[in-house]
Amino acid sequence: MDFQENNSPWLFQIKRIRPARTINKDSTTDIVVVGAGIAGVATAYFILRNTDKRVIVMEAGKVAHGATGHNAGQVVSYFERPFNDIVKEFGENMATAGLAEVESAWDLIELIYKETGIEVPLSQFTGYAGCTTVDQILQHLKNDIYRIKANLPRGPVIIDKAIIEKKLIPARYDGMYEVASSRKILNLLETDKKHYIAALGSRKGCLNSAHFTEDLFTVLLEKYPDRFEIFENTPADIVRLHKNNAEIVSGAHTITTGRVILCTNGFEKIKIENNHGVSINKEFHHMVKGSIGYMAAYRDIGDHPATATSYLPAENSDEDGAILDATPYYYLTRRIHYTGIEIEPGLISVGGPEKRIDDTTSYSNSHSFPDEARAAIDTFLQTTYRHAPAKQIRYAFLWHGLMGYTPNGIRRVGADPHNPILLYNLGCNGIGILPSIAGGERISKILRGDTLSPSIFDIPMHN
């Protein structure tokens, strides 16, 4: 089958019956959220929950049809940047507080499930990252020192006994890892590729964030009929910022609002006019760069539990798998493929190949899936994943999504220093579900008037 369209399993699972509303008149509200993905719905949820504000969400396309509907579906809480670099930039206290805030999203997402009764499956487990170099192990152990000092939970670190026998791990890390045979490590990683020398465990999960987002918006419309509206196929063309409010122009209509929050990777299509203070348009347009991630999935008839595994390459990576050049790291999730009606065979999803782009306006959901990305995923599966089909893989889904990368690799959450009428909860940096949810709660605290300590997520004066 020749896949020319962006064929995401997460959007395929949505059986939507809610009609889409497009803006058809001028409106006034307290808060406008631009973007109806996981960040937009989390932001709207916590604002409605924690304040008495009226909220309108604007979406240029359809709910969850951006990065939220075109991701890998892994739920993880680390940064795609060496944590000790974050410590160097912000200091140990602020860095560990930021990490704790992201990890608090595990509790926040469970709160959302409890309060709303959403039934979208969320699998949770200990997942692993496979290391190929001693430096990757040492970087992870160095980061774990900070976790221990901050009383943050840490997962198991399991190292090949051959590495320990060669005395390649300094004594200061004694007691922080387990020693195991190569076979045990390969079993944890579900591979027979013997150059993996350690397995780094952490709390992980699998979630269809598109289905989650659609269902949560439906709940918000039912629960807050007097305070919440959502407009789809309603792009924010112009955002005019004033001293005490903002105007958002969409076609022939204008929404006047007290504050506006950008929760979208498609920011370059929005014209920002700051009528109170210095221009922020140039800085805004260069705050986040784009990257296209390519993913594929096939049906799995094996009887295996849900999992999420990362495979770090032998070079050009850090301990969290950050892409430092063209060499990708690969990530694999395995889950029950729930259609909303019945349980089908499991789904193996794989991603890794990326393409960096300087201008996100050049990205289109309708771009064809490149042959080289499919071939790279084929090669990874056939050479690394133990349970991959022996013959040619017949993919049920091939898709790609736009990810936003901030200059320092950390999500932007908070008010713009040039005009606090404008706020942000954006920059997935390759890992978006938990940071989006934590960012949504942070935004609600700002709008509630809470006094927050300086954070690694704050917007710098010069973006």
Image: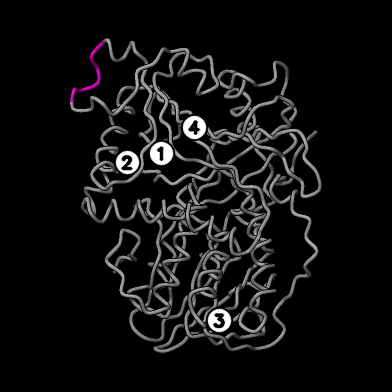
Q: Circle 3 — which element?
A: strand
Q: Which residue is drawn at 43% across and 19% down?
A: 196
At label 1, the amino acid type is Ala
Question: Which comes sooner in the sequence, label 3 or label 4?
Answer: 3
Q: Position of residue 445 (x, y in %)?
A: 41, 72
Query: What colouring style does the render use?
Result: one colour
Q: Does the magenta stretch include residue 169?
A: yes
Dominant SS type (magenta): loop
Q: Which of 175 and 358 is in front in this view?
A: 175
Classed neighbour count for the residue bearing mark 1: other residues with Cα under 10 Å, few (<14), some (14–19), many (≥20): many
In the picture provided, is 386 more to the left or to the right than 300? left
Q: Which residue in the protein does label 2 denote?
A: 82
Q: Where is residue 462 in the image (x, y as percent from the top left)?
A: 30, 66
Question: Which comes sooner in the sequence, label 4 or label 2?
Answer: 2
Query: Which of the two discs, 2 and 3, sits closer to the camera?
Result: 2
Image quarter of the C terminus: bottom left
Q: Are marks 4 and 2 in contact (CB under 8 Å)?
A: no
Q: Do the residues labelled 1 and 2 touch (CB within 8 Å)?
A: yes
Q: Which of 251 and 341 is in front in this view?
A: 341
Q: Distance between the residues labelled 4 and 2?
A: 16 Å
Q: Circle 2 — which element?
A: loop
| Magenta highlight range | 166-171
At label 3, the amino acid type is Ile
Q: Which residue in the protein does label 1 denote?
A: 322
Q: Circle 1 — which element?
A: loop
Q: Which residue is drawn at 69% across and 35% down?
A: 347
Q: Position of residue 273 (x, y in %)?
A: 45, 80
Q: Which residue in the protein does label 3 denote?
A: 248
Q: Distance between the residues labelled 2 and 3?
A: 38 Å
Query: Which of the two discs, 3 and 4, sits closer to the camera?
Result: 4
Q: Which residue in the protein does label 4 denote?
A: 310
